[in-house]
Amino acid sequence: MPRILVVDDQKTIVETCRMYLEHAGFEVDVAYNGMQALEEVARAAPDAIVLDLLLPRLDGREVCRRLRADGRHMPVIMLSALATEDDRIAGLELGADDYLVKPFSPRELVVRVRTILRRVPPAEAGRVLRFEGLEIDRDERRVFLDGAELTLSPREFGLLAEMAQHPFRAFTRADLIVRVFGDEAGVLERTVDAHIMNLRRRIEPDPAKPARIVTVYGVGYRFEGVPCG
């Protein structure tokens, strides 16, 4: 049974989330500030975290940053009353996997938790992502197609690894710029398109009819592949 950690300094929100998530079949731990959140992660190793942005003692930004710096890759759904596109991008840049604006429907939260657990390979699967015919080693930054190693540029590898960590999730070009290019200045959306085109030439049986990295029209791109052992 997946274990979810809910972190918010408002007890009403915590208890509402707990009630709905437990009713949906999840085990739920709770924390009310950032330091408690890190302690609970160390104690219980949750499968996903629902994390408020504005927390006492240690805010959600710093909690998320420390989790990623420590190599903890469980998915994080960020909660915030800040609703602008810049706020959302800032949350994703910190390593959050999803962003839910307050006030939110607890039923929608349950759906998002279920969806993100389906899309994100479990932490215990290690740093090697395996799909039919394709293997991505995130530690050694190596990619194998049908057993043969491919030569990818650092940006091509970053885009592939980022999308493959979240199979079937649609990424906008802006999301990919934030997640892969970081603070690098002057990156344009067409730069992402160029790297995707190069990736398709390397990993697709027919680059003209891509089956692994597909275009989501009006949005961006999605990696399609079912993780295997």
Image (cartoon, helix red, strand yellow):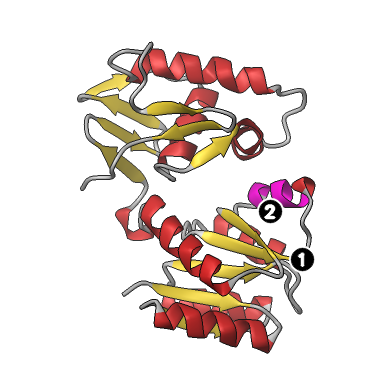
| Residue 96 picture location, percent across and down | 60, 55
Query: Of residues 102 and 14, which is closer to you in this image?
Result: 102
Q: Is residue 43 visible?
A: no
State the SS at label 2: helix
| Residue 217 picture location, percent across and down | 53, 27
Residue 64 marker: none
Q: Is residue 151 above or below residue 51?
A: above
- Measuring 39% from the left and 76% from the top, which residue is drawn there? 24
Left or right for 221, reference 9: left
Q: Quadrant of residue 178?
A: top right
Left or right for 224, reference 73: left
Query: Of residues 21 and 107, which is closer to you in this image?
Result: 107
- Measuring 54% from the left and 25% from the top, which residue is drawn there? 155
User: Where are the magenta residues, as a range?
Assistant: 87-93
Q: Is residue 52 visible?
A: yes
- Measuring 60% from the left and 70% from the top, which residue is drawn there? 105
| Residue 111 picture location, percent across and down | 47, 63
Residue 81 marker: 1
| Residue 212 picture location, percent across and down | 35, 28
Number of residues whose C-alpha sits closer than 10 Å to that of mark 1, classed few (under 14), some (14–19) or many (20 or more): some
Asked whether 88 falls inside the magenta stretch, the response is: yes
Considering the image in quadrants, where does the N terminus appear? bottom left
